[in-house]
Image (tube, grey):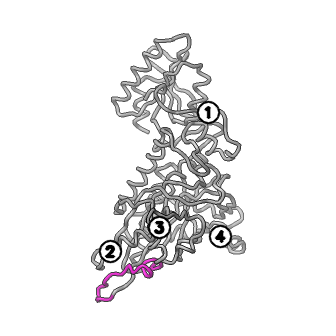
């Protein structure tokens, strides 16, 4: 992609309500544009990053045997009335009527709808277990949307739902998702800590939030720093190992403010190990048994011929929120460095084009074509402006690697820089090796 052809409307002017760094940088870098309060258009740069996050989430869901589907954004109010949540959910739910006067809603979550799909299709224990997921837009009418994509009204989310015969089987599905989330956030370059949390309006008695540390987070967290030392890679993908993994994490004190008990915290955690800070919730998993299957008649025939309510759990990851959360976890002053797995491009070529320097542009185009042949995703900055402005712009965009054709470049060697690191003078072949290795 040539920068002159890339729609990336970088701006210096920021709305006064852009209080946190992710909101500021996403607006400045032309990643999003506000449409109305808490609702954004995702422009090419931001959209490309979000789609990369989506793909990683999808791959890790597929790896544990979850099956992708797609449910609509608009749901009938009838199934919500059937579950008893229609009136309880509150004003965050956007309620509407179609032209026939039927009550509808813009889905804030999908427990009711997926249970309705399940009950009409699955009748026997022989079809269990099942884990279904979809990636779809949601809407919650926040009373005070703020912080850009971190707390908005319309957001992009992965939500999954498990169906099992018994509590014991359901805990196995829960453990699979627990493992999947830790792997997902690791691939995204984030250290997300599972913390015991309240179940909120979704209900149930087992719940974990996955939190990344950030001063701008809305969740107050209390934890033993030992939890950061657990290496999830030592666990295998079998029931016994997955159960051991969740027990190991759960044995170390780590909670959000809703679950915080000062006396217990001080008794269980040495003073030197106590972490009291803020964090950003990037995922939430719940086990709620038959909370929805009972009122919605999500019944199956058991082995002994009895009809029993299926056991369920739900599992959410805020994909659009993760774009902002990743910025909060990785920015340094005005420099953003995307994790390599979700960077919009692998590398950017920055030639000095001052005084109509066509030679540098020709070299840059040759490098560009060579890297493209190696399936390396490249951005070429072919815009004629001074190098100082170019560097500021690319620090803001946050592509992790830069190839610079400037005064230090030699005939067959070029300046190569990883953001927040020193410049090296390397041949194109050495640069290719570095890019492929990473």
Q: CA distance from mark 4 to mark 2?
A: 37 Å
Q: Give the residue pinned by disc 3.
A: 101
* Image coordinates for residue 211, horizontal then vertical, percent: 58, 59
Dot 2: what SS? loop
Give neighbour class at mark 3: few <14, some 14-19, many 20+ (Cα, 10 Å): few
Residue for point 39% across, 54% down = 58
Q: Which of the two labelled residues, at mark 4 and mark 3, occupies the earlier sequence position?
A: 3
Q: Which of the two labelled residues, at mark 3 and mark 2, occupies the earlier sequence position?
A: 3
Q: Give the residue pinned by disc 2.
A: 120
Do the numbered discs 3 and 1 sit on residues whose CB atoms are within 8 Å? no
Q: Nearer the viewer, mark 4 or mark 3?
A: 3
Dot 4: what SS? helix
Q: Give the residue pinned by disc 1.
A: 11
Residue for point 41% across, 37% down = 437
232 with respect to 422 (left or right)? left
Q: Which residues are magenta?
A: 289-306
Q: Give the residue pinned by disc 4.
A: 258
* Image coordinates for residue 324, horizontal then vertical, percent: 57, 48
Q: Is residue 260 above or below residue 146?
A: below
Q: CA distance from mark 4 to mark 3?
A: 40 Å
Instruction: Mark yes or no: residue 376 visible.
Output: yes
Q: Nearer the viewer, mark 1 or mark 2?
A: 2
Instruction: Mark yes or no: residue 241 visible.
Output: no
Q: Is residue 74 above or below residue 418?
A: below
Q: Nearer the viewer, mark 3 or mark 1?
A: 3
Dot 1: what SS? loop
Give neighbour class at mark 2: few <14, some 14-19, many 20+ (Cα, 10 Å): few
Residue 27 inside the magenta-drawn segment:
no
Q: CA distance from mark 3 to mark 2?
A: 26 Å
């Amino acid at each position: 992609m040539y920068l002159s052809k890339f729609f990336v409307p970088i701006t210096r002017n920021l709305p006064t309500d852009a209080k946190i760094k992710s909101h500021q940088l996403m607006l400045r870098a032309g990643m999003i544009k506000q449409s109305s309060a808490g609702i954004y258009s995702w422009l090419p740069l931001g959209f490309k990053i979000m789609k990369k996050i989506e793909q990683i989430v999808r791959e890790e869901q597929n790896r544990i045997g979850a099956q992708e589907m797609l449910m609509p954004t608009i749901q009938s109010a009838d199934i919500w009335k059937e579950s008893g949540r229609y009136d309880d959910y509150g004003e965050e739910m956007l309620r509407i009527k179609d032209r026939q006067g039927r009550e509808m809603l813009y889905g804030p979550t999908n427990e009711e709808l997926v249970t309705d799909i399940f009950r009409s299709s699955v009748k026997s224990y022989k079809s269990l277990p099942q884990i279904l997921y979809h990636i779809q837009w949601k809407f919650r009418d926040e009373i005070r949307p703020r912080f850009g994509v971190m707390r908005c009204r319309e957001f992009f989310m992965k939500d999954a739902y498990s169906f099992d015969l018994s509590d014991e089987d359901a805990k196995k599905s829960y453990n699979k998702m627990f493992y999947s989330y830790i792997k997902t956030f690791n691939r995204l370059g984030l250290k997300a800590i599972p913390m015991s949390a309240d179940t909120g309006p979704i209900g149930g008695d087992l719940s974990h939030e996955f939190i990344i540390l950030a001063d701008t987070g809305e969740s107050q967290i209390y934890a033993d720093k030992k939890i950061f030392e657990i290496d999830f890679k030592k666990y295998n993908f079998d029931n016994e190992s997955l159960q051991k993994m969740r027990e190991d994490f759960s044995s170390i004190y780590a909670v959000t403010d809703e679950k915080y008990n000062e006396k217990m915290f001080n008794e269980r955690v040495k003073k030197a190990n106590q972490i009291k800070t803020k964090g950003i919730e990037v995922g939430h998993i719940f086990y709620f048994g038959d909370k929805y299957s009972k009122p919605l008649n999500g019944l199956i025939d058991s082995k002994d011929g009895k009809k029993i309510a299926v056991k369920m759990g739900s599992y959410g990851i805020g994909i659009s929120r993760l774009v902002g959360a990743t910025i909060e976890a990785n920015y340094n002053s005005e420099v953003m460095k995307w994790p390599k797995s979700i960077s919009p491009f692998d590398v950017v070529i920055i030639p000095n084009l001052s005084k109509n320097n066509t030679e540098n542009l020709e070299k840059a185009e040759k490098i560009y074509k060579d890297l493209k042949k190696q399936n390396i995703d490249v951005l070429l900055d072919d815009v004629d402006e001074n190098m100082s402005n170019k560097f500021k712009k690319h620090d803001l965009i946050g592509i992790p690697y830069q190839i610079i054709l400037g005064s230090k470049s030699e005939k067959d060697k070029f300046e190569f820089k990883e953001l927040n690191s020193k410049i090296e003078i390397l041949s194109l072949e050495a640069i290719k090796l570095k890019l492929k290795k990473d």
